[in-house]
């Protein structure tokens, strides 16, 4: 499950995090959001490449009713999600031989929460 950091019920927790770790609380939320996204069966709802991804074997559900930023998805056989080691806002879906095919952006900061994904059209070599 991906935590909706913009949920008002979490405001007190965010306040405490900001007070105890004023220089790193947003970064920790970003890292937690990335871990949750990669571990889940969810992907961002916003995507301009749905048809191309479906032709590749992706199966998408409708936007989640509790969190419309995301939707459940089945990836093609052998594909998986991985975290970017250099950024807590970027993750990728790699194919069965480890090539990055889809880039996913998720900003978990409660004041600017958003997500999207796109097909990587130029393959790595």
Image: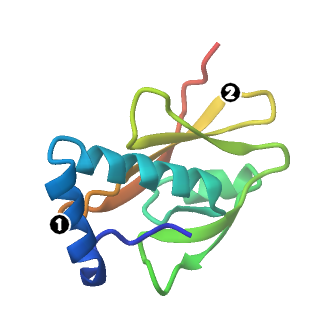
- Residue tagged 1: 15
Estimate how packed mark 2 is, as few (under 14), some (14 to 19) or many (20 or more) residues with alpha carbons within 10 Å.
some
- Residue tagged 2: 99
Label ID, residue 79: none
Side of 110 relative to 100 (left or right): left
Does 86 sit above or below residue 8? above
Q: Quadrant of the C terminus?
A: top right
Query: Where does the image place residue 98, in percent across and percent down from the top left?
Result: 73, 28
Could you tell me which residue is drawn at 72 percent across and 54 percent down?
55
C-alpha gap between disc 2 and disc 1: 40 Å
Residue 117 or residue 35, whichever sits in front? 35
User: Is disc 2 in contact with disc 1, using a CB cutoff of under 8 Å?
Assistant: no
Could you tell me which residue is drawn at 85 percent across and 49 percent down?
77
Query: Where does the image place residue 56, in percent across and percent down from the top left?
Result: 73, 49
Which quarter of the picture shows residue 6? Answer: bottom left
Does 51 sit above or below residue 25? below
Estimate how packed mark 1 is, as few (under 14), some (14 to 19) or many (20 or more) residues with alpha carbons within 10 Å.
few
Side of 88 relative to 92 (left or right): left
Report the colour scheme: rainbow
Residue reaching furthest bottom? Answer: 65
Q: Mark 1 falls on what kind of element?
A: helix
Which quarter of the picture shows residue 48? Answer: bottom left
Could you tell me which residue is drawn at 41 percent across and 55 percent down?
116
Residue reaching furthest right? Answer: 77
Which numbered disc, 2 or 1, marks the residue that appears first in the sequence?
1
Q: Quadrant of the N terminus?
A: bottom right
Could you tell me which residue is drawn at 50 percent across and 67 percent down?
2
Residue reaching furthest front? Answer: 20
Which mark is nearer the camera, 2 or 1? 1
């Amino acid at each position: 499950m991906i935590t909706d950091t913009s949920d008002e019920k979490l405001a007190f927790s965010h306040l405490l995090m900001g007070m105890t770790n004023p220089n790193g609380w947003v970064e920790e939320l970003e890292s937690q959001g990335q871990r949750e996204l990669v571990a889940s069966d969810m992907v961002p709802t916003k995507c301009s490449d749905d048809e191309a991804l479906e032709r590749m074997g992706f199966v998408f559900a409708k936007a989640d009713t509790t969190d419309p930023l995301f939707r459940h998805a089945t990836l093609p056989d052998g594909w998986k999600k991985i975290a970017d080691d250099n950024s807590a806002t970027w993750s990728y879906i790699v194919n069965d031989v480890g090539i990055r095919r889809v880039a996913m952006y998720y900003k978990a900061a409660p004041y600017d929460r958003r997500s999207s994904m796109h097909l990587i059209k130029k393959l790595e070599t």
